[in-house]
Amino acid sequence: MTDLAVHARGLVKRYGDLVAVNGLDLTVRRGTCLGLLGPNGAGKTTTIEMLEGLKRPDAGEIEILGRAWTDRADDIRERIGVQLQETKLEEKLTVLEAVTLFATFYRRRRSAADVLAEVGLEEKRHARYETLSGGQKQRLALACALVNQPELLFLDEPTTGLDPQARRRVWQIVEEFVAGGGTVVLTTHYMEEAERLSDEVVIVDQGKVIEAGTPRDVVARLGAEAVVELHFGEDGAGALAIGDDELRSVGGVESVRREPGVVVLTTADVQASVSALLGKLADRGIALEDLRTHRPTLEDVFVSLTGKHLRDG
């Protein structure tokens, strides 16, 4: 298992009668980024907190960098970095003081000034925590996670609240970290982020892994050439006027999913399907407000498997 940064087997976590994580297995190869995706309540945050050593599983085993939390906890903490979904620091601390404080927790550490420059906060080094914007607080949390030169970095929604430029800066930091041999476990609600950064993705729902693989392989399993969206307007009357079976009878159409005022189809032959759909709607006198097509994405797979959009999770 020396090539694995994370190896988890049969993880279970219960909160009373609620089973948040239900027999979950997870492996992360060293030098890669794994994207852990799932709708709200799927168990991904509980999973990552168990991997980080913040929560103890009710059943199962976890090895981090070849060591178990049960007997090598201090050693593991020295070698990992953690950015929580929400981090709160003492309001009167300055940015520089916060990173310097975190550096004292570790035997191996980086210069606070270097880390602040990496996350783009050098100009805010003397600003108090209470004066920072939400995005700046996120970048400060990332700086604190990087100060000990970790081998394994856990990032729980690291770019929430960041503007597009700051988000891309975080992406660059993650990419450089992995290129330098580091390993990242990432949760995100931004599908573009998951597709760009992840060497592999794991989709979790109801505490179980329901799909895993490279982003390209996961998308390929949808088995569709294209996704067709039929927009019928706000009242959605047109969408209700045509049934799922009738839509599935159109050549090339493989699946049908409905959203308010919109019918989403996957097809193996987009040209034939669109032509037949338009003809069928015209024959039925059903007005169509808009028609859009796109190549299948990770978002389409996610919705197909969970019934929810990642951004709504």
Image (cartoon, rainbow, N blue to C red):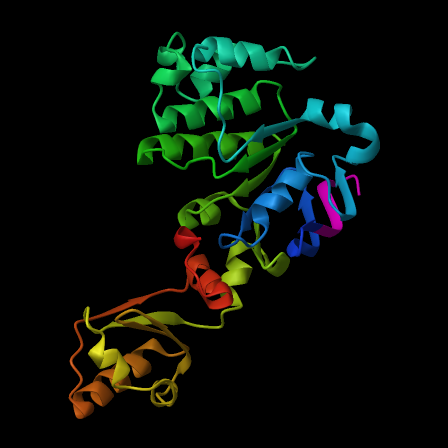
Observer able to see residue 157: yes
Provide the major secondary structure of the magenta segment: strand
Q: Residue at x 54, y 41 (%)?
A: 186
Residues drawn in magenta: 1-12
Q: Residue at x 63, y 58 (%)?
A: 209
Q: Which residue lies furthest to the front in this view?
A: 16
Can you say whether 241 is above or below 169 in the image? below
User: Where's residue 146, x and y in %?
Assistant: 56, 23
Counting labels gives 0
User: Where's residue 7, x and y in %?
Assistant: 74, 45
Which quarter of the rendering shows the N terminus? top right
Q: Which residue is drawn at 50% across and 27% down?
A: 87
Quarter of the image where one finds residue 5: top right
Depth order, front residue of 40/175: 40
Question: Residue 2 magenta-drawn?
Answer: yes
User: Where's residue 233, x and y in %?
Assistant: 18, 70
Quarter of the image where one finds residue 51: top right
Can you say whether 259 is above or below 178 in the image? below
Depth order, front residue of 170/199: 170
Depth order, front residue of 84/56: 56
Can you say whether 280 is above or below 121 in the image? below
Observer able to see residue 68: no
In the picture, measured across the screen, residue 191 lies left or right of residue 70, that is left
User: Where's residue 155, x and y in %?
Assistant: 54, 35
Question: Residue 29 magenta-drawn?
Answer: no
In the picture, measured across the screen, residue 107 lies left or right of residue 237, that is right
Q: Which residue is drawn at 49% across and 19% down?
A: 89
In the picture, measured across the screen, residue 206 lies left or right of residue 113, that is right
